[in-house]
Image: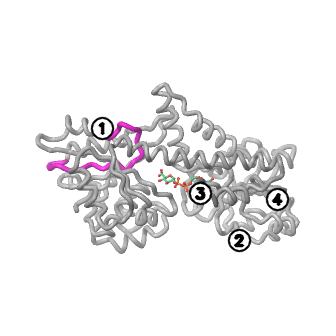
Amino acid sequence: MDISVAGTGYVGLVTGVCLASRGHKVTCVETDRQKLAALRAGEPPIFEPGLRALMAESAANLTFTDDYAGAYKNAEVIFISVGTPERGDGYANLKYVYDAAEQIAASAESGCTVVMKSTVPMGTCEKLEKFFACHAGENVRIDVASNPEFLSQGTAVRDFLNEQRLVFGVRSASAEKVLRAVYAGFTKPVIVTDPQTAEMIKYASNNFLALKISFINEIANICELVGADVDTVSYGMGLDKRIGEKFLRAGIGYGGSCFPKDTLALHWLAKYHDYELKTVKAAIEVNENQRIRLIKKLRKYHKSVEGLRVAVLGLTFKPGTDDLREAPSVMNINILLEEGAAVTVWDPVAVPRVKAMFGDQVGYADTIERAVEGTDACLVLTEWEEIKNFDLKKFKHLMKTPLILDGRNCFDLRAAAEAGITYDSIGRKR
Ligand code: UGA
């Protein structure tokens, strides 16, 4: 099929590349010149394992262009996978979705199916269909379908190729037929429903996962008070298939471009309809507090943060990505700097992005050893393998005061004690 993709963020690019790998002719639209040049040179502008290799393998089926009119003119299917960031008041900002819709309406010369991949509030696909009915060319029928993505950064390629389910939110048999043809060869369960329900499946899934994380984080906080071990609690809970083991890892809260935005969007959408989503509101509040949990712990060990030398290990919102959006590291570094600490950071991939944010306000170390040398405390914020495998004895040897505050439970309690480290993690005994 001839498929075009609007937006080459991690969802759009992964979608385009994976569909090209399945034999479709895919044109990805990118108007940023630098990004376009990189894409044309086979270089993904995002760090996503497996993506570059699959891009190279599928090059014969992939085109990158800034000529959106040419890309949309005769495409059979157009995916919209642009950002829907938080607008500042909690609602999702649909500006980029409508920018793409306007370009499609102005360019499409034959009927096509526009497939919404971006996470959008319920009712958006229906509104878009009306928009196209008014703005597309004469006799150009544009169907709109919702096909939410369930890709996680860091495993997006694998997730796409092995989707656990496909959701088709359609209003016509022809749109369903088109989506079935796009995903021919994928053998996963397909849920065919209306667009609103499809849009809600996406929001409800992300919100439920966020709830699960906030729940286990609260349990972790109580574990600390009563002397229980949250990792064992998670394990014990997770063996119950009704609960499931996933997303029960306690830590310093969820970050990234999805959960924080999608919990707020659903919360405010409910408010708009005069309904309070109490569970989601609680998840958001718990997460806000959890993100500064390590700073609170730090204050237990040092009366004042002022003048302390602090190492921050791990900056991205999770391992396997260079994304800093809503990463707990940003908030934690800001607080440490405001309170007068000298901060040195280490991360295997995110340092260039952090430099753009913090400039010379923090020190940058190219090894964990250099980051922790001479420090009074070390905060672990991302569970990178390099950190998990780091020899604990080196902390004792290199740090001025061997205090590790671990927001991702990377180390074994006994090993930390044996190494002579003061080790305080999330929801575990000290
Ligand atoms: C999330 C969803 O998992 C995807 O299914 C969804 O498609 C995507 O959002 C999206 O809407 O585009 P992502 O944000 O990439 O994916 O990352 P996750 O693996 O879900 O992690 C999100 C945050 O939760 C991270 O900060 C992670 O550290 C945290 N987390 C995750 C925990 O604190 N504990 C856990 O047990 C799991």
Between marks 2 and 3 in the image, the one whose residue lies nearer the viewer: 3
Circles 4 and 2, Cβ within 8 Å, touching? The answer is no
Q: Amino acid at mark 4?
A: Tyr
Q: Amino acid at mark 1?
A: Glu
Q: Is ligand 1 closer than 8 angstroms to the Cβ of mark 4?
A: no
Q: How is the image coloured?
A: one colour
* 152 is within the stretch colored magenta: no
Q: Which residues are magenta?
A: 108-128
Badge 4: residue crowd in 10 Å (few <14, some 14–19, many ≥20): many
Q: What is the x, y in percent for residue 140?
A: 14, 44
Q: Is residue 165 left or right of residue 169?
A: right
Up the image or down, 43 lies above or below 73; here it is below
Q: Earlier in the sequence, mark 4 or mark 2?
A: 2
Circles 2 and 1, Cβ within 8 Å, touching? The answer is no
Q: Residue at x 17, y 54 (%)?
A: 74
* Residue located beneath label 2 in the image: 389
Between marks 1 and 3 in the image, the one whose residue lies nearer the viewer: 3
Up the image or down, 196 lies above or below 53; here it is above
Q: Is ligand 1 closer than 8 angstroms to the Cβ of mark 3?
A: no
